[in-house]
Image (cartoon, grey):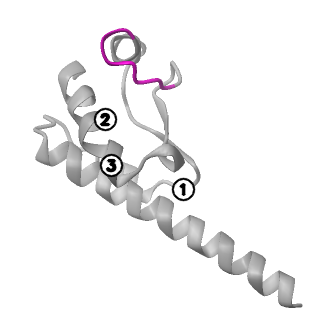
Amino acid sequence: MRYVRFGNKKLTDMRQRIQRMRQLFVNTLQEKGANRDFSFIIKQNGMFSFSGLTKEQVLRLREEFGVYAVASGRVNVAGMTPDNMAPLCEAIVAVL
């Protein structure tokens, strides 16, 4: 039983961290001047999030900024940190 509680706590911690990164992502995009509303990202669940970026924008992110996302626009929220958020959002705003 102790292991189940430990596992549940870890999952809760990870879920909360990802939710904080979603909120920080949306807030930072807005602070950096994104000209569209990304608030829908806050309502999504899981380690990845649909960003709404086009295939062309994703390609520019990769080629110009070394930022990788799936061609469909999905981004890895679990890989985001407070330290990499500003450069990530600056790159996204640049390709919008």
Identify which amino acid the numbered label 2 is placed on. Leu
Give left or right: position of 35 versus 54. left
Residue 55's x, y, as percent?
43, 14
Q: Residue furthest bottom?
A: 1
Question: What residue is shown with label 1?
Answer: 45
Q: Residue furthest front?
A: 83
Q: CA distance from mark 1 to mark 2?
A: 20 Å
Instruction: Give the image quarter of residue 62.
Output: top left
Query: In front here: 11 or 96?
Result: 11
Q: Which mark is residue 83?
A: 3
Q: Which residues are magenta?
A: 63-69
Residue 34's x, y, as percent?
16, 36
Q: Which mark is residue 88?
A: 2
Quarter containing the N terminus: bottom right
The answer to whether 30 is drawn above or below residue 34 in the figure is below
Please give the name of the residue rendered at 33% of the width and 11% of the height, measured from the top-left corner: 60
Please give the name of the residue rendered at 47% of the width and 23% of the height, measured from the top-left corner: 68
Q: Secondary structure at mark 2?
A: helix
Mark 3: few/some/many CA within 10 Å (<14, 14-19, 20+)? few
